[in-house]
Image (tube, rainbow, N blue to C red):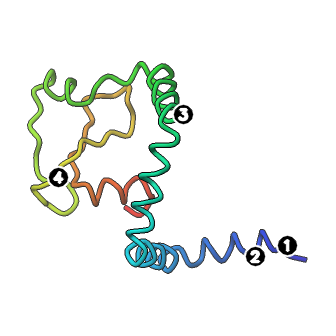
Amino acid sequence: MVSDIERATKWNKDNADYRREYMRNYRNTHIKYFRDYYTKYRQTHKKQLLNNYHHWVRTNQYKENVEAKIQRLNLIMENCACCNASKNIHAHHENYDVWNCIIFLCGTCHQKIHMGVL
């Protein structure tokens, strides 16, 4: 017998594109609510968010500032490697230990890679 959790997990996996599009439309439809909610959340949880940030910095000290590393390696920000866009370029790297393997992507493609779409 399949449990409700297993059924929901399978449905979510099988309908990932539909869910992504549905959530995008939902967020766009309710944009004012989300902006107000997150603005209020950031104000009321300022100390907790700051502590989370400082904890991340302490535990990820090996991750040198990306911009400084790019300047040190004399890399030139190129167009997006996926779609050839020239605006909103990010530096993407799979492994922080191998710094000479940096790929330049636009923000959209960078997000898609982290979501596992590309």
Image mark for residue 3:
1
Above or below residue 115? Residue 55 is: above
Residue 9 picture location, percent across and down = 69, 69
Q: For this rendering, which residue is in front, 8 or 95?
A: 8
Q: Earlier in the sequence, mark 3 or mark 4?
A: 3
Q: For this rendering, which residue is in front, 27 or 1?
A: 27
Locate residue 110 relative to residue 19 in the image: left or right. Answer: left
Specify the quadrant of the image occupied by residue 11.
Answer: bottom right
Q: Dot 2, how many residues are within 10 Å of its Cα: few (below 14), some (14-19), or many (20+)?
A: few
Q: Dot 4, how many residues are within 10 Å of its Cα: few (below 14), some (14-19), or many (20+)?
A: few
Of labels 3 and 2, the one closer to you: 3
Q: Dot 1, how many residues are within 10 Å of its Cα: few (below 14), some (14-19), or many (20+)?
A: few
According to the picture, the residue beneath numbered tag 3 turns out to be 48
Q: Earlier in the sequence, mark 1 or mark 3?
A: 1
Structural distance between the alpha carbons of marks 4 and 1: 44 Å
Badge 2 element: helix
According to the picture, the residue beneath numbered tag 2 turns out to be 7
According to the picture, the residue beneath numbered tag 4 turns out to be 88
Q: Earlier in the sequence, mark 3 or mark 2?
A: 2
Q: Amino acid at mark 3?
A: Gln
Q: Amino acid at mark 4?
A: Asn
Above or below residue 85? Residue 18 is: below
Q: Amino acid at mark 1?
A: Ser
- CB of mark 2 within 8 Å of CB of mark 1? yes
Of labels 4 and 2, the one closer to you: 4
Residue 20 picture location, percent across and down = 47, 72
Residue at point 29% right, 59% down?
Answer: 109
Residue at point 62% right, 73% down?
Answer: 12
Above or below residue 91? Residue 20 is: below
